[in-house]
Amino acid sequence: MIFSLNSCFTPTHSFKNSKLLGYDLKKTGPSFPLGKQKVEVKGVDVALGEGTRPPQPLTFTSPLLAPAPCLLGIADQCHSPCGLPAATLPPERVRQSCGAAPHTRLFRLGRNKDRKQILIQTPRPAKSAFTALGALAELFLQRHPGCWKMLTVAMCMALLGCLQAQELRGHVSVILLGATGDLARKYLWQGLFQLYLDEAGKDYSFSFHGAALTSTKQGQAFIAKVLESLSCPEDVAPDRCAELKGQFQRLSAYRHLATSEDYMALSKDIEAQVQHGGLREAGRIFYFSVPPFAYADIARNINSSCRPGPGAWLRVVLEKPFGHDHLSAQQLATELGGFFREEEMYRVDHYLGKQAVAQILPFRDQNRKALDGLWSRHHVERVEIIMKETVDAEGRTSFYEEYGVIRDVLQNHLTEVLTLVAMELPHNISSSESVLQHKLRAFRALRGLQKGSAVLGQYQAYSEQVRREQQKPDSFRSLTPTFAGVLVHMDNLRWEGVPFILMSGKALDERVGYVRILFRNQAYCVQNDEHWVADQSQCLPRQIVFYIGHGELGSPAVLVSRNLFRPSLPSESWKGLGARPGLRLFGRPLSDFYAYRPVREQDAYSVLISRIFHGRKDSFVTTENLLASWGFWTPLLDSLAHEVPRLYPGGAENGHLLDFEFSGAQLYFSQRQPERLVPGPGPAPMPSGFQVLKAKYRESPLISAWPEELIAKLADDIEATAVRAVRRFGTFHLALSGGSSPVPLFQQLATRHYGFPWAHTHLWLVDERCVPLWDPESNFQHLQTHLLQHVRVPYYNIHPMPVHLHQRLCAEEDQGAQTYASEISALVANSSFDLVLLGMGADGHTASLFPQSPSGLDGEQLVVLTESPSRPFQRMSLSLPLINRARKVAVLVMGRVKREITMLVSRVGHEPKKWPISGVLPSSGQLVWYMDYEAFLG
């Protein structure tokens, strides 16, 4: 610490250039006057390094003035000749004045015309401040008695600086709840120790409280064992490590924490500790390393009994899972919001602490100029966000049965990474608020997921592990996926049409995580590929990879193809990756990349704990972003609830069984899994004969197949019908139903039927929800997303239902139903569509005609307003009489959830009031049923 002061002042002199304790010391009150004018010091502004802190009003009466610094000389120029004369104070006298402390060093600064300047450097405030000042003043003031007043001001400013430095220090209490759990043992105690290594000796003192429901004796033994196993980074000397480790052990203690009285006692102990040490409490960190069901009780106890006092902050750290779906996440957020403010909650996604992930935004910012022309749909072919594991779920099946791979990995880790890649880059990435708002906008741009957006798998031993660990019967068969690939699209100008592939799974061939941005290759190279040079040839793959860890490299890394650009990374934290001859990544040798790795590898939890301490919210999940993520994933999870995952053996034996492809918004496995009969439990023999399925359903033709085959067959039939209609009538009028079942059909028509007569096709809606047409729940919006934007249908041939008129939704006085009926009558000959595509609900409804509907099941109305039993309640629908005028009606029924209604409807007669689908029977046209095996056979 360096102390220095001006020895005298002019009437207009300020302390702008003075140095005190290595801090910038500025006079914030009026100028220091001479003579008999009253000296008034209102405050000082003291800051560490280059930063600043707000000025704080100080007085000279504080009891903390006592431990003054050792102040010995002059550092700045003086406007009057009252400085120390050359050689006035010999070094021996200086050292004697400071108590001959061995750490004291004397500095003689540059000589001025009339005087010499002297400084003393010491690492801590000297106890003999006034002795030191007296030694200086003894000789000096004998010659210049008029400088007493100035020296008095100087002493006061020195003491104020010491006071300010002390007031910047505070005490932080860290309470680790669940301190004896696996997460705490593996990561959190080490992360807290790393925090202490980084912050020890700086502005704060610490105490660490490990808390759990374990008995005091067992808890103390556990904590002692964990603390003994802590380690320091390689760059910390062994002696220094041992010293700091001992300090950390002395600062850490275990306590049983269960009741409100326990929390109250903890708070009192913290307050007593702070008061006894003469400290100021800076804040408290409560780390919830406990199951979510315990959050509410703990939060209530903290809020009522263990909050810090005024002026101190509270930070509550929450571990995932944060709910099971959107509703449960919302309920949990509301519950916690009753106890804590949003700025007090830090939801941890440890992936945001991984060094390669944490580098995504800084990399984009530091290379903004190079990436501006590349980071968009015009140049990016696809983005892959991958986390593969070799371990299985053994020992964790109770957790996995509740959550599965999508909730465990994709909904949080991979989605957070997706937003870092896809979000618009803020002008200031150091602004937590700006980063979080841009992430939220990225969530809003995500296109809704459908059942066909995902492929699922399960390693073969999983069900057996569940039966063993959870005492399930031998017949139990789990549907929980342990592998998932999901195709995501963004609906914005930057990323429209670019596929984002998210994939994770257990029992795979390697452990690795990465984010890979693959760029389009539009170059043609004349020379043979043997002559291609990595940093010159544009024909080589162009990619940027954020290598999260493990895999072939074994460490985090940032890789940039040499034929893209030379990236800029901070040299103090990232360094070039050494040569690895023979190592290939993503099909290319490592030498094809500019490759960088961290100078010092850090555990993700250590990074995040440090950011919690420093209040960096951008590395954590806010309530808004959490609910936005669940809002995106919940519809897909609901649609996949009864889906049977593909079985895979695990490890290298998986071969190509889990490879998948995408077409449009549809994802599917590359290889068909061969269907075979397998023996069930017990001694029953394998069947020797099979019965051929009937080709009729309710006396009408039935086509049944696996989903992919069924959709392909239906698309072929629709195209054939369209070609015949155009050849015969010049136009083809097609009415399409809403819901999720037709989405794969739309994608099939858009991507594989290039001979479809779209220019002569009129598209109508069978039904529509009473929401704006741009609403994600709108049937027209589904049609636009999955079909219309991919095919060339004249805009005047597209006929959405007029549910939104005069800024109102389905108001009877707007006569939207009558308007649509009139449009049909005017354009469709005899109001007879060439083909109507319907679905069948689990309650037997079709279109938006529900059981006991008061209108639409009979009568002369062509289009009606109806009420749905589920939100949104209001609907507009074609009536049964209009549907039955069609030349052909196709009913598409898919999924195991439809098995029960399929069986029921097969046995009932013509009862549209109970089962509206039973009223579908074209008067002069053809009815064909299209059912997949799960709907037909279960």
Image (spheres, helix red, strand yellow):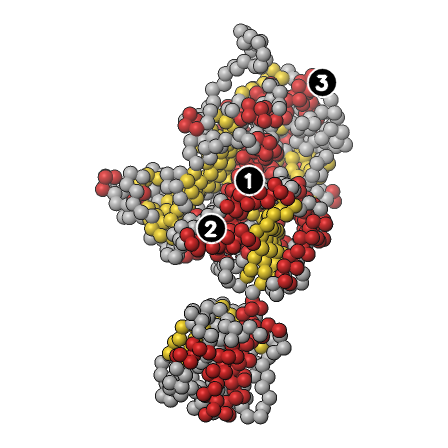
Answer above or below: position of 866 versus 193: above
At horizontal 46% and vertical 83% (from top left) the residue drawn is 136
Q: Residues within 10 Å of mark 1 (few under 14, many from 20)?
A: few
Q: Nearer the viewer, residue 827 or 636?
A: 636
Q: Can you give x and y, in whole percent of width and height, for residue 142 in the image?
A: 47, 91
Q: Can you give x and y, in whole percent of width and height, for residue 521 in the image?
A: 35, 43
Specify whether 887 is left or right of 606.
right
Indicate the secondary structure of the residue bearing disc 1.
Answer: helix
Give the mark nearer the N terminus: 1 vs 3.
Answer: 1
Give the residue at mark 2. Answer: 358
User: Mark on residue 909?
Assistant: 3
Q: Quick check: can you spot residue 747?
A: no
Give the residue at mark 1. Answer: 182
Marks 2 and 1: CB-CB under 8 Å?
no
Give the mark nearer the N terminus: 2 vs 3.
Answer: 2
- At label 3, which amino acid type do we have? Gly
Marks 2 and 3: CB-CB under 8 Å?
no
Q: Can you give x and y, in whole percent of width and height, for residue 741 in the image?
A: 58, 30
Answer above or below: position of 243 versus 454: below
**CA separation, marks 1 and 3?**
61 Å
- At label 1, which amino acid type do we have? Asp
Q: Residues within 10 Å of mark 2 (few under 14, many from 20)?
A: some
Between label 1 and label 3, give the one nearer the viewer: 1
Specify whether 536 is left or right of 700.
left
At horizontal 53% and vertical 31% (from top left) the residue drawn is 393
At horizontal 53% and vertical 44% (from top left) the residue drawn is 226
Q: Nearer the viewer, residue 496 or 748?
A: 496
Indicate the secondary structure of the residue bearing disc 3.
Answer: loop
User: Mark on residue 864?
Assistant: none
Between label 2 and label 3, give the one nearer the viewer: 2
Q: Give the position of the C terminus as an image quadrant.
A: top right
